[in-house]
């Protein structure tokens, strides 16, 4: 069960980004207008990029409460990368 959750945390947002790109490429390209930004978002911060795409508007971009949602996506990214070290701290002591 733990492995399934880990796979969903790491591959789920990337699958959603690819699906979003194929369903609405014009919105995706307008919101993320740089290849470097899209690659970094896809590989390093997928939850943040997904949140940004969800709250982005063509007329005004991201404003107000939208930035809170983007910050929450960033928090999920950071917690996904750092959560494994925190939960395995008890196992690391047994190797010494």
Image (cartoon, rainbow, N blue to C red):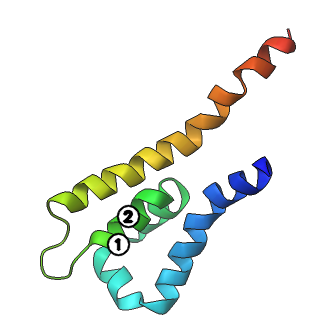
Residue count near mark 2 (Cα–Cα under 10 Å), binned few <14, some 14–19, many ≥20: many
The image position of residue 48, as x and y in percent, is 41, 57
Q: Is 87 in front, or is 22?
A: 87
Residue 94 visible within the image: yes
Query: Tag count in the figure?
Result: 2
At x 40%, y 49%, the residue is 74
Image quarter of residue 57: bottom left
Tell me how far mark 2 sits from mark 1, CA to CA. 5 Å
SS assignment at label 2: helix
Q: Is residue 7 left or right of residue 47?
A: right
The image position of residue 18, as x and y in percent, is 55, 78
Residue that numbered label 2 is attached to: 51
Q: Is 20 in front, or is 2?
A: 2
Image quarter of residue 43: bottom right
Q: Are marks 2 and 1 in contact (CB under 8 Å)?
A: yes
Residue that numbered label 1 is attached to: 54
At x 40%, y 54%, the residue is 73
Label at residue 21: none
Image position of 95 with respect to 69: above or below:
above
Q: Is residue 69 left or right of residue 59?
A: right
């Amino acid at each position: 069960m733990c492995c399934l959750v880990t796979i969903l945390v790491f591959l789920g947002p990337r699958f959603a980004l690819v699906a979003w790109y194929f369903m609405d490429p014009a919105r995706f390209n307008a919101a993320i207008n740089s290849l470097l930004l899209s690659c970094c978002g896809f590989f390093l911060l997928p939850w943040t990029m997904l949140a940004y795409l969800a709250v982005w508007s063509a007329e005004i971009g991201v404003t107000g409460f939208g930035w809170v949602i983007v910050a929450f996506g960033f928090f999920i990214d950071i917690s996904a990368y750092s959560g494994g070290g925190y939960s395995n701290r008890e196992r690391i002591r047994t190797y010494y």
